[in-house]
Each structure stands twice: as C-alpha cells, then as structure tokens.
Image (spheres, rainbow, N blue to C red):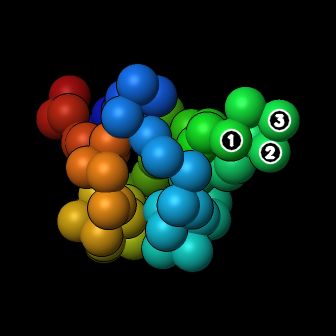
Amino acid sequence: MRVVADLGLCQGHQMCTGEAPEVFGFDDDADLVTVLQEHPDESLRSDVTSAVKYCPAMALSIEED
C-alpha cells in the first residue's frame, strides 16, 4: 500500500494524525499534513484507512502496490 496526501486539498484539520500518528505528521509552518511513511506496514492498514475515511477535505488516499 502507498499513502498519498494531496496537499492542494489539505486544510490542516489534522484528523489523520489522530487516526494514524505513525504514518501522518503535521507541518505547522505550512499548515499541511506530512506523510511520515509512504509505504507503511500492512499492520497499520486499519489506522490508515480510518485516516483516509475521516479526512474532512478528502485529501488522503491509498494506492495499492
């Protein structure tokens, strides 16, 4: 799995950092999400899926390898 963040859509809500803190960080200066692990371990899939689902701006997605 590959995690993708569309920074053009990101509104800085930081919901993703609460759902999957191992995968998503936040750049306070840019007020945008950062992807800490572009290819996270499969054990984190549930957390990443929740982050994608609950992103208010729909800025996150999962691409299958």
Q: Which mark is residue 29?
A: 3
User: What amino acid does circle 3 point to?
Assistant: Asp
Q: Mark 1 sits on what residue?
A: 31
Q: Is residue 58 visible?
A: yes
Question: Viewer-proximal residue, 11 or 45?
Answer: 11
**Label 1: few (<14), some (14–19) or many (≥20) C-alpha neighbours in 10 Å:** some
Question: Viewer-proximal residue, 12 or 41?
Answer: 12
Quadrant (top left, top right, bottom left, bottom right) of the N terminus: top left
Discs 3, 2 touching: Cβ within 8 Å: yes
The x and y percentages for residue 52 are: 29, 58
Discs 1, 3 touching: Cβ within 8 Å: yes
User: What amino acid does circle 1 point to?
Assistant: Asp
Give me the residue at 83% from left, 35% from top.
29
Distance of mark 1 from mark 2, alpha carbons?
5 Å
Q: Quadrant of residue 43?
A: bottom left
Distance of mark 1 from mark 3, alpha carbons?
6 Å
Q: Is residue 45 visible?
A: no
User: What amino acid does circle 2 point to?
Assistant: Asp
The residue sitting at the right extreme is 29
Distance of mark 3 from mark 2, alpha carbons?
4 Å
Discs 1, 2 touching: Cβ within 8 Å: yes
Q: Mark 2 sits on what residue?
A: 28
